[in-house]
Image (spheres, coloured by chain):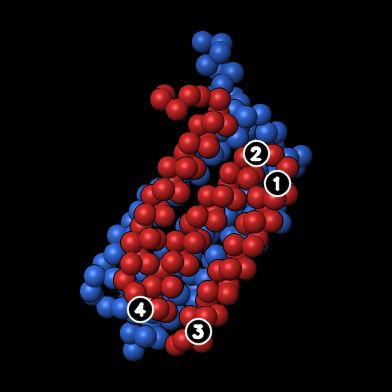
Chain colours: A red, B blue
Amino acid sequence: MEAFLYTALGVLVATSYMCLYRIGSGPTAPDRTVAIDILGTSLVGFCALLCLLTGRDFYMNVAMAWALLSFIGTIALAKHLEGMGFDE
Amino acid sequence: MNEYIGVAIVIVGLAFDVFGCVGLVRLPDIYTRLQAATKCVTLGTCMILIGIAILTGLNATGVKALVCMAFVLITSPTAAHAIARGAYKFGVKLEEPTVVDRYAETQTDEGRS
């Protein structure tokens, strides 16, 4: 079980590096925004697997807070790309 | 028995995550990257959380995993729509083999009427 969880965490770290590649080399700003969104969503799964691996409960709270805060950040970046103010 | 089912669901979710991120790296255009990455990674993360809820059983951690799955399932498509609209308004052109752009047609129709 433990070896499986470590393998799963390694796979998620590999997907995070793919997202980091797209953040670094994205030709336009929306590419980087998509990659930041995807990075946040896959790190929610990372935190949930850490909760199962270490047996500590607070990692799931971190995952919930991360999901909501990543959503707010992505919406703010999308509004900024669209050229609107934040109060519309 | 529950352990095998949960591990299988987590493995399928990890496969969806990997394929979504490969699409994010390999595809040529912002819109194709968006549709590959967002859908695959949302489903993959939701399956990981369902698998963890099955593995831990019905206690506080499992219920939190299900609530977190609901959050991801609501917020991620909303963010994807906002990014697509923002990218179009930002002025990113569609890649060359794309043949139809319905959003531009609606924009011109609104301008005429």
Residues indicated by labels 1 and 2 sit on the same polypeptide chain:
yes
User: On the picture, is A83 further left or further right than A48?
Assistant: right
Q: Is residue B35 visible?
A: no
Distance, label 1 to label 2, CA atoms, is: 7 Å
Q: Tell me which amino acid carries mark 1.
A: Gly
Q: Quadrant of residue B86?
A: top right
Instruction: Tell me the CA gap for discs 2 and 3.
Output: 37 Å
- Place of residue B85 in the rendered image (x, y in percent of width and height, measured from the top left): 54, 33
Residue drawn where x is 47% and y is 42% of the image: A73
Q: Which of the labelled discs sits on residue A4, or is there none? A: 3
**Pick the front one: A33 or B85:** A33
* Mark 1 chain: A
Q: Residues within 10 Å of mark 1 (few under 14, many from 20)?
A: some
Instruction: Kindly give the residue lying farthest to the left in the view shown.
Output: B59
Which of the pair B4/A52 is nearer the observer?
A52
Mark 3 or 1 closer to N-term? Answer: 3
Provide the secondary structure element on which disc 3 rests.
Answer: helix
Q: Earlier in the sequence, mark 4 or mark 1?
A: 1
Q: CA distance from mark 4 to mark 1?
A: 37 Å
Pinpoint the chain carrying mark 4.
A
Q: Are marks 1 and 2 in contact (CB under 8 Å)?
A: yes
Who is closer to the viewer here, B77 or A73?
A73
Residue matched to label 1: A26
Q: The disc numbered 2 marks a residue on which chain?
A: A
Q: Is residue B34 left or right of residue B10?
A: right
